[in-house]
Amino acid sequence: MKPTIAFLALLIASSSPVRALEWHARGARALGMGGAGVALAQGPLAAYWNPAALGRPTSNAYGLQIPFGVHAAMTGSVIEGAKNLKNLYDNKANGTPVTDAQVADALNKLNQPGSGLRFDGDFGTDFKAGKIGVFLNGTVDAGAVPQVDLGHNTAAQIQNNTSKLIVKGANIVELGAAYGHELPFAPGLYLGGALKVMTANVGYSDYFIASNSNDQGTIVNKLKDGAEKSSNFGVDAGLLWDVARTFDGVALKPRLGVVGRNLNNPKFKQPAAATAAGLTGKYAVNPQVRLGVSISPFNWWNLAADVDLTRNLTPVDNAASRQFGLGTEFNVFNRSWLNIPLRIGFMRNTAETSAGNVFTAGAGLNFLHVILDASAAVSNKRVVTESQGTEKKMPREVALGVQLSFLFGGSDEAKEPAAPAREWKAAPPADDQPVPTEKVRQAAEKAQEDLKVEELKKTAPAGQP
C-alpha cells in the first residue's frame, strides 16, 4: 500500500498552488448533481472526472459520450454600471438630457472592487473501450473586468469617456488518452492517469463601453483578435477506492476519489496585447485537485459530494473559485434497456462569502443504448443589470449542460469481492444413510428364506416344481 499512499500524498501536495482555472462541471449528469462526479464517475467521461474509474466495472461502460455545457457568472455591479453608462452615452448622442449625477452613479457602479463577468464552456467527444479512454475535449474560459475612466465623469464629458472592459481568456483543446486499473494487491483500489496534448488560443483585448462602441464588434470577436496559439502537454491522475470491494459486508457501497488535473502546470504564450498591457510570463494552467465521495443506498439511488482542494482563480481579477457540490440521482425504471434518471443538487463557491447557492436539476432518457441527458443550474441570488429607467435583474450565476451518449456493455454494478471460501460437504447418498435395526433383521430373514427355496429347487426330482 505504500506506493498508493505516496500517490495520494502527491495529489494533495499538488493543491498548494493558489492559481488554477475554475473547475468545469463537464457532462449533464454531474451538473445535475451539483457538480459532483469524482467518486461516481463512469463510462467515457471518467477520463475527465477521475481516470481511475475507467478500471471499475459499471453499467454502460463502453462507448461514446458527447457533452456540451455553458456557464456564466457575474460579480459586483459590472453589468449594471456598463449598461447604464452605455445608455447615457446613447442618450447624450440622441439629444436626451443627461445629468452629472447619472454619469457619476454609472461610473461608481462600474468601479466596484471585484466586479467582473466570466463565461466558460466545454464541449467534446469521449470514447471508452475496456479500461482505456480516448478524448478530444475543449474548454473556454473568459472573463471581463472593468477599467474605469474617472477623469471624464460629467454629462458634458461622457462622449470622451474611455471606460472599458478588459477581456481575457483562453480556448484550450485537449487530445489524449487515459487508463484506469484495479491494484491486484488491494481489491477495490483503482489508480488511473491521462496524458494529453493541449493546444491553447490565448486572447486579450479592450472593449470600450462608450467611446467608439459601435465600431468594435462583439466582445467575443475582440477576444479572438490577436489571440496567440501555442501547444503543450498535460498530465492528470486519479485514485478511487470502492470500499465495498475491499471489505465484505460494508453497507451503502461507499466510494472515495481524488483527482488531480494538469499536475505538470502547462503554460502557453501570452498575446502581444497582454504583454503590452504589462502582463509578464505565460498563461499558466495550474494544477487542480478535487476530492469526491459517494454512496449508493440502493442500486437505483446514488448520492455524491465533491469539493475543490485547490483555491482556483478565475479570469476575473480577485475572484476566486473553490466549489463544493452535493447531489443525488434517482433511477426511475433502472432497467438495462430503459431508465429515466432524475437529479437534483446544489453548489456553493466557498471562496466568496457573497456567492450564494446555485441549485441544479436534471433528467435523462436511457432507451436501449442511446442516452440523452440535460441539466441546468441557477443561483438563488439576483444582480441588477440595468437601473436607468426600469430596473432589470437576472440570476447571478447560470449554467446549462446537455449530453448525448451511445453506451454498451458492463455490469449492473461493481462486483464485490467474493466472501471467504467456506467448507462445503454434500449430503451422503441415500444408500449410505443409517438403516434401522428392525429393517436389517427383516432383510436377513428374507434372504435366508430365498436361499432355502433355491436349495429345494436343486434337490427336487426332474419334472417337479
Image (tube, grey):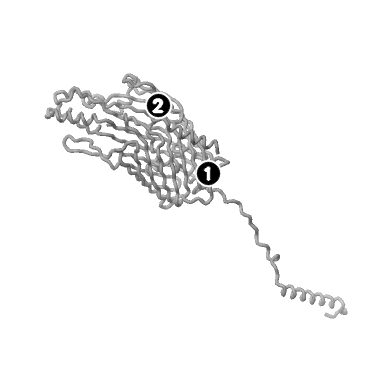
Q: Is residue 370 left or right of residue 431?
A: left
Q: How far apart in space, not on screen, are marks 1 and 2 (Cα)?
A: 35 Å
Where's residue 254, x and y in %? 47, 47
Residue visible at 65% across and 62% down in the picture = 427
10 Å crowding of disc 2: few (<14), some (14-19), many (20+): some
Residue 139, above or below 433? above
Where's residue 405, x and y in %? 43, 42
Residue 84, above or below 456? above
Q: Are marks 1 and 2 in contact (CB under 8 Å)?
A: no
> 456 and 397: which one is in front?
397
Report the quarter where the C terminus lies. Answer: bottom right
Residue annotated with mark 1: 188
Q: Is residue 196 left or right of residue 325?
A: right
Tell me the amino acid under the disc marked 2: Ala
Q: Is residue 173 visible?
A: no
Q: Secondary structure at mark 1?
A: loop
